[in-house]
Image (tube, rainbow, N blue to C red):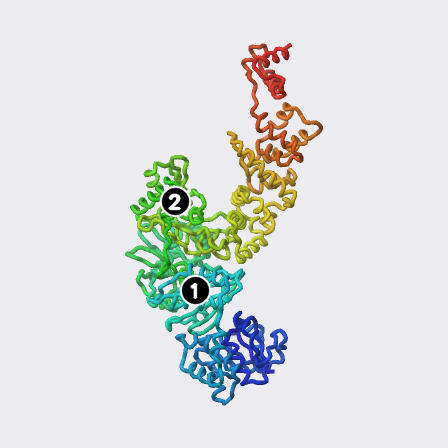
Amino acid sequence: MDLITTHIGADFDTIGAILAAKKLYPAAFVAFPGSMEKELELALKRLTLPFLVTPATEINLEDITRLIIVDTRNPSRIGRFRELLGREDLIIHTYDHHPDHSKDILANGGAVLPYGSTTTILTLILKDRGISVAPQEATIMMAGIYEDTGSLCYGSTRVEDYDAARYLLGQGAVLSEVSGLLSHELTAGEISALHNLIENKTTYTIGGLQVTIAVVSIEDFSGEVSELARRLIRIERMPCLVLLAQSTDRVHFVIRSNTPNIDAGLIAGLLGGGGHVGAASATIKGLTLIQAKERVLMHLKDITLPSVTAEDLMSTPPITIESTACVKEAALKMRRFNINALPVTSKDGLKGILTRQVADKAIGHGLGRALAMDYITTELLTINTETSIEEIRTLIPELGQRLLPVTKDGQLVGVITRTDLIKMLKQELSEASLGRVKKKRVITSLMSQQLPAWAFTLLRDAGKVADAQGYKIYGVGGFVRDLIMRRDNLDIDIVVEGDAIRFAKKLGLILKARVKTHEKFKTATLICPGDVKVDIATARLEYYEKPGALPTIEQSSLKLDLYRRDFTINTLAVCLNHDNFGEVLDFFGAGLDIKERTIRVLHNLSFVEDPTRAIRAVRFSERFGFRIAPHTEKLLRNSVKLELLSRSSAPRVREEFIKILKEDMALHAIGRLKDLRILPLISTKIIWDKKAEDLFEGARSTIAWYQLLYRDEKIEPWLVLLLALTDNLKKRELMALSKRLRIDNKKNLATLAGRGQALKALRAISAGTAPSASRVYAILTPLALELTLYLIAKADTPEIKKIISRYITGLRDSKTKLNGKDLLKLGVGEGPEIGRVLGKLLGARLDNKVSSRSEEIKYIKELIK
């Protein structure tokens, strides 16, 4: 058979081209390889096509002798028909208006011409051959031309498109019906999505050309993304738009260009998709929106920037090692950063380069402890920061060295590698090296309203110190997130693009605060009057030596510092320098995710690098009432499946789990941990069912009751909840969990170990008739207060709960009027006898046998007799 097919995601140009092709190949079957655009699908329900469409699954591929493909030559876009392409006896005809690509399907016939639409190509063939079309057919084909040429207004429109439209108009095409086919009334969901796109778009100036990037989540969106792109570019009058739409496990790229200087089809081709100069699209699986945006920017720079220099491409600050280091240390550092060459430096500057290959060979020969200096390459070609990219491209292939050192004023300021590093740095520096135009958000007034006066003044003072030292300084993370959300949070975190410890010491002098420094992590903590703490860190990037390990810190820029964070909502920063005080920096779409109430990771390895983020995702989700984005949840479930949390640092798991227990929504959070199968990775023995939920909620109510008493004795509420959560565990299972979480605080460990004694106490109180007050006191006093509160929650009857609560509110604090000295004067012997008599006296007071001092004296005298 002959078969006419097209690309997945068929549009009106596709259906117009198929209709015309059916005129050229009247005996051919027609089959779509996959879905079509929603507007086309709706329109086809109103139209009667002059041909039948056979479902692709019903086509026997072995029967096909000639394959006619319209509107694409991309093999990845024709679905199951791609399986035919290797057959030598297959005849292929292609009709397409998209630019050539090296991976295009090779054809035996057809026509490929750079017109505004594929329908134009086939219409003119029909015209030349004298093949007429019916008015309805002409109307549908005209819709195809109008759609792809923007009603003959796009920059990609050619004279031939007008010729084809003129011919179809002569064949009876009805323009009012064309308008009806292409018109689209926006739904409420589409209007909301369009509003979000307008509010969250960013415009970049690249090589003098303006490109707007807008992002939207379509996980719960049923509209047509291409229609949103068409509306957005029309409303905002953009020269070029790249719309990124995140679905469950992939990102869709919709690219529209109204300038001949930016080829939408070329950009889409680099992304694995296709299209023409004015309109194109692509889809990539396994990317976050942030990664997708950086990839687009990288490709845009590749095809538009004429004057990129070494300073734009280099990695800075360079990863180096001191000349006093040994070969083994150098090899470890190269593996850690996944680089193949390492500059060796001293006080005098760059000494040479050590390659990983040389280092590994030296270690193989037992020379791991030898100086790295002894095996470096010293004959080096270096470049300066002004060296053009064109010159770099000519130098790198000819070099024997694996990287190019970049110098400025004789000092090493960066490096450029031959392969991966250039691409990586383009991604990391894309926004920093492009002109970025976005409406600035300044929250100075919000800060003054939301923060206490002392906190606002502190941030102002911090900015002044940073200005004096020449540093850029920012408030970051949850502190800024909660400012935006108007939630109270005085856990102030500050990031310094410079020496955080030097900055902290100077600020400490001004604030009269103590400064605790942590040289290893390049951080400091200010402890201000009133026990106010401020954490200060050097802008840094973290790398993890293995999944679940504690991070290792290297100096970096603010954007990279924020990129290492867990979720987009925690990547906001607010500038504290005087000239830009209160200006919000949002590199990763945090504002949009806060607005859409979504928890989203920044990259696909987020839960691999730190599996405890799975617990944190649940915590933030329940605290804020946010949903976990489907792609993020998929990544989370995958890390759970790999059981990475089981290999994580025990203190990190413990701290995250305790934070969950401290949340107001802890009950729901535990249930979510169970649903996501995170809970079994903490303990396989915990049973979370209706009974467990009731006990846990009872423990929460008991804690709230105790806190309303405003007693001096403080408790650890999370410990009471942990006792409730692990109620079904046997003693050895509970202690194994304590060991797993490294609960090594002696008091907390003793409390957990005392659970068995507490349960015996509960049984004793519950047995038989109500015990006397002195009996209750004797039973409960040896227990930690957290255990006593746990028993109130666990008690089966209101009467037992009341007995234990009465102990806390009254009996626990009871004391005798007489003391040990008084007893000696009354004739009680020294030693243990004093304690025993005082105990009996307290019991008599608790049971209301004595109340005054005189009655106590009388009681003691009778006791002595």
Q: Of residues 510 and 832, which is closer to you in this image? A: 510
The circle drawn on residue 500 is none
Of circles 1 and 2, the one toward us is 2
The reply, left or right, for residue 60 in relation to residue 657 is right
Determine whether 202 is above or below 810 in the image. below
Residue carrying label 1: 296
Q: Quadrant of the N terminus?
A: bottom right
| Label 2 crowd bin: few (<14), some (14–19), many (20+), radius 10 Å | few
Residue type at the position of mark 1: Val
Residue 758 lies in what quarter of the image?
A: top right
Q: Of residues 386 and 93, which is closer to you in this image? A: 93
Q: Position of residue 171 (x, y in %)?
A: 49, 85
Q: Are marks 1 and 2 in contact (CB under 8 Å)?
A: no
Q: Quadrant of the C terminus?
A: top right
Residue closest to the far front? 176
Determine whether 2 is above or below 241 in the image. below
Whichever of labels 1 and 2 marks the residue nearer the N terminus, that label is: 1
Q: Position of residue 683 (x, y in %)?
A: 61, 45
Q: Position of residue 12 (x, y in %)?
A: 50, 75
Residue carrying label 2: 449
The reply, left or right, for residue 4 in relation to residue 431 is right
Residue closest to the far left? 409
Q: Of residues 490 and 262, which is closer to you in this image? A: 490
In what element is the residue under mark 2? helix
Q: Is residue 530 visible?
A: yes
The residue shown at (38%, 44%) is 449
Residue type at the position of mark 2: Gln
Q: Position of residue 502 (x, y in %)?
A: 34, 43
